[in-house]
Image (tube, coloured by chain):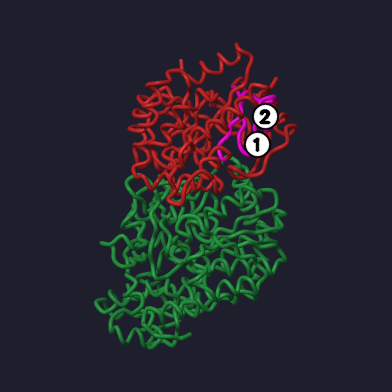
Chain colours: A green, B red
């Protein structure tokens, strides 16, 4: 499939470009290292020993395959399309982030690195990285904005329990983008022993491609599972998108089935007509940040502006370059849901399905709630339930005006 | 002739080395920064590097990061940066000015418009830290057409395979990043720096300027002994930062204090043989 002309799944090119986006916009000091990561990755993915270890960890450590689940009561409630959840929230550590953390830590080990670093927003990627670092006996430092540390205390403590050092980030807006700046600063200073485990499909090539490949297991499993359960492929896929790792993981194996509709849901915060949102596609412009060219939230002078979302994991002013390419190609639809819509969806999912979804995933559910009632009953939708919401109960309680101590 | 080429030719004839000073445009205010900029040649700066403020300077340490945040508060940083160069150029016709920073503010300004405006303001070179050779043609080519040098960076991680890639197509001078790290961090040993400069000179005829971790007149002297130029940035910015009041405004006499430090750095460089 990779060589098929007019394919949507053959990107990037040799230099890591997805059309005009992606690439390697990093300090020269990092260039040899980024190229070494690419070389190691290309070698690893054709090495049976690497593949076997990755598959074994997926099965016995993460608990893959994650179930594909018919969300019967939500389907009945919305009285339209038939809804399935891809249950990534049941993975070890509670989200899809572990998929790329495992893949990258195995690569770090092969490259002889003794220390891993990561940036984190909601803490899910930080927890995933701390987890795999503990599992493989590597030192681990996680960079996390002070603002995010305050709103994600349970995850901060989890990382500490797992033996990671959580480094508070105070520069800029003290959120995810600033954590990524500090991680890059650490990496450039410690190139000799450190591997940077990036938490989404962004950063310099090969990261957007590599993280996508690790996450594509979501879509590959979904293909098999839906064939078993329904005897055909779905009509539509729905996922939330911040940097875009869970969305690309679900979509990528379906991109060349061009009849399948892909909806990616950005976080609209207080609304797209305000300056408090995280919609890089709907409200951003092309720019360069964190090693890649992509759409960014920025002012007229090219200064990066703060993103806002009730969900810390979507609170990033950029998006992976492959998403920008897919948007410009018209292959994936980029829509949005506000904080309030996500909160409503969060509660509905809890009440009808007995599943507490992450606030990130709740944005995808919010879009589903909008569209499902008007779709026919034989319209099959698979929604990526990318994470569980235990980490978010304090934020939700706060938003609902409830005191839970 | 580009002022950078003329400057190094002059220095070579005089058998001396260059002091390159870096300040962030508009830090903390445009007035203060312009006053400082105007005084740098007299204090002994041979080449001026002017930082273009960016909200997310991920290759810089805390000193330059904070300077950028201070400068951005004044608004429209790129327009004001070019205005400062224009004012400087009206008084100093020979001292080269190199703009240093990140690509995004240039993209937002528009690459062609930027090259045209920078050339007419009197800019001689660009150092864009997040445009490695693989990605720099979209700015390097239009800059060259406007007569502006695109300065390439070599680093301690530039191995024998990488170094020719960096030097192929380099112009103006080569900026050697003396330590793997961020600005204002650790310092390299003179022996390591000297060996690295020799490796570069074996492959390129361009002058080599060395930066990162040079904080004192003594260190500037040591570097000037083994390279064509010593670049000092964070240490100058630290002098600015310690002279700001609680509102972030410069205290009286601050520019004189900073310029005095620059003249001490210049003495160090002049003492090199």
At 39% from the left and 58% from the top, the residue drawn is A306
Residue holding disc 2: B223
Q: Nearer the viewer, residue B39 or B140?
A: B39
Q: Residue furthest front?
A: B252
Which range is magenta?
B207-234
What is the secondary structure assignment of the residue under circle 1?
loop
Residue holding disc 1: B178
- Looking at the image, can residue A14 be seen? no
User: Same chain for the residues at labels 1 and 2, yes or no?
Assistant: yes
Name the subunit of mark 1: B
Q: Nearer the viewer, residue B220 or A105?
A: B220
State left or right for residue A259 relative to residue B264.
left
At 69% from the left and 25% from the top, the residue drawn is B226
Residue B11 sits inside the magenta stretch:
no
Residue B224 sits inside the magenta stretch:
yes
Q: Is residue B46 above or below residue A186?
A: above
Q: Are marks 1 and 2 in contact (CB under 8 Å)?
A: yes
Q: Is residue A248 above or below residue A359?
A: above
Q: List x then y, in percent, for residue A93.
A: 57, 75
What is the secondary structure assignment of the residue under circle 2?
helix
Q: Earlier in the sequence, mark 1 or mark 2?
A: 1
């Amino acid at each position: 499939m990779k060589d098929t002309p007019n394919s949507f799944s053959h990107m990037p090119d040799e230099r890591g470009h997805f059309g005009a986006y992606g690439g390697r916009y990093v300090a020269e000091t990092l260039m040899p290292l980024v190229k070494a990561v690419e070389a190691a990755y290309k070698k690893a993915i054709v090495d049976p020993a690497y593949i076997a270890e990755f598959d074994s960890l997926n099965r016995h450590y993460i608990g893959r395959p994650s179930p594909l689940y018919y969300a019967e009561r939500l389907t009945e409630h919305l009285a339209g399309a038939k809804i399935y959840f891809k249950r990534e929230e049941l993975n070890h550590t509670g989200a899809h982030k572990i998929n790329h953390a495992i893949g990258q830590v195995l690569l770090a080990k092969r490259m002889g690195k003794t220390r891993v670093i990561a940036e984190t927003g909601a803490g899910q990627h930080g927890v995933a990285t701390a987890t795999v670092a503990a599992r493989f006996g590597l030192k681990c430092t996680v960079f996390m904005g002070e603002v995010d540390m305050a709103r994600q205390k349970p995850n901060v403590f989890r990382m500490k329990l797992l033996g990671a050092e959580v480094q508070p980030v105070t520069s800029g807006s003290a959120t995810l983008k600033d954590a990524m700046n500090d991680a890059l600063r650490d990496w450039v200073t410690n190139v000799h022993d450190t591997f940077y485990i990036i938490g989404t499909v962004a950063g310099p090539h090969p990261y957007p491609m590599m993280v996508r490949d690790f996450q594509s297991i979501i879509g590959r499993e979904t293909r098999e599972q839906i064939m078993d359960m329904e005897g055909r492929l779905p009509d539509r896929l729905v996922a939330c998108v911040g940097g875009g790792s869970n969305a690309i993981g679900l979509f990528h194996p379906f991109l060349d089935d061009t009849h399948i509709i892909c909806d990616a849901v950005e976080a609209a915060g207080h609304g797209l007509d305000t300056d408090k949102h995280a919609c890089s596609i709907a409200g951003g412009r092309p720019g360069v940040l964190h090693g890649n060219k992509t759409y960014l939230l920025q002012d007229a002078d090219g200064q990066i502006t703060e993103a806002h979302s009730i969900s810390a994991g979507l609170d990033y002013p950029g998006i992976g370059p492959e998403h920008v390419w897919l948007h410009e190609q018209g292959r994936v639809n980029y829509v949005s849901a506000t904080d309030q819509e996500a909160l409503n969806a969060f509660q509905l999912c809890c009440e009808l399905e007995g599943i507490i979804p992450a606030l990130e995933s709740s944005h995808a559910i919010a879009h589903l709630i909008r569209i499902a009632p008007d779709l026919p009953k034989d319209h099959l939708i698979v929604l990526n339930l990318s994470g569980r919401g235990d980490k978010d109960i304090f934020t939700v309680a706060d938003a609902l005006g409830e005191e839970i101590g | 002739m580009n002022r950078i080429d003329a400057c190094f030719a002059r220095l070579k004839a005089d058998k001396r080395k260059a002091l390159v000073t870096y300040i962030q445009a508009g830090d903390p205010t445009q007035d203060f920064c312009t006053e400082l900029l105007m005084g740098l040649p007299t204090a002994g700066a041979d080449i001026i590097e002017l930082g273009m403020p960016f909200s997310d300077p991920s290759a810089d340490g805390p000193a330059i990061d904070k300077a950028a945040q201070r400068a951005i508060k004044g608004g429209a940083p790129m327009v004001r940066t070019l205005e400062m160069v224009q004012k400087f150029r009206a008084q100093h016709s020979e001292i080269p000015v190199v703009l240093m920073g990140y690509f995004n503010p240039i993209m937002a300004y528009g690459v062609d418009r930027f090259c045209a405006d920078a050339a007419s303001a009197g800019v001689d070179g660009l150092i864009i830290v997040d445009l490695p050779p693989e990605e720099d043609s979209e700015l390097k080519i239009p800059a060259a057409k406007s007569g502006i040098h695109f300065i390439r960076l070599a680093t301690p991680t530039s191995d024998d395979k990488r170094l020719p890639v960096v030097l192929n197509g380099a112009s103006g001078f080569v900026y050697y990043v003396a330590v793997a790290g961020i600005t204002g961090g650790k310092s390299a040993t003179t022996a390591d720096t000297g060996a690295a400069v020799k490796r570069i000179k074996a492959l390129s005829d361009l002058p080599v300027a060395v930066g990162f971790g040079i904080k004192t007149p003594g260190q500037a002297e040591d570097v000037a002994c083994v390279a064509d130029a010593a670049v000092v940035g964070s240490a100058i910015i630290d002098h600015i930062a310690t002279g700001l009041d609680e509102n972030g405004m410069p205290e009286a006499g601050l520019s004189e204090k900073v310029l005095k430090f620059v003249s001490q750095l210049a003495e160090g460089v002049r003492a090199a043989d």
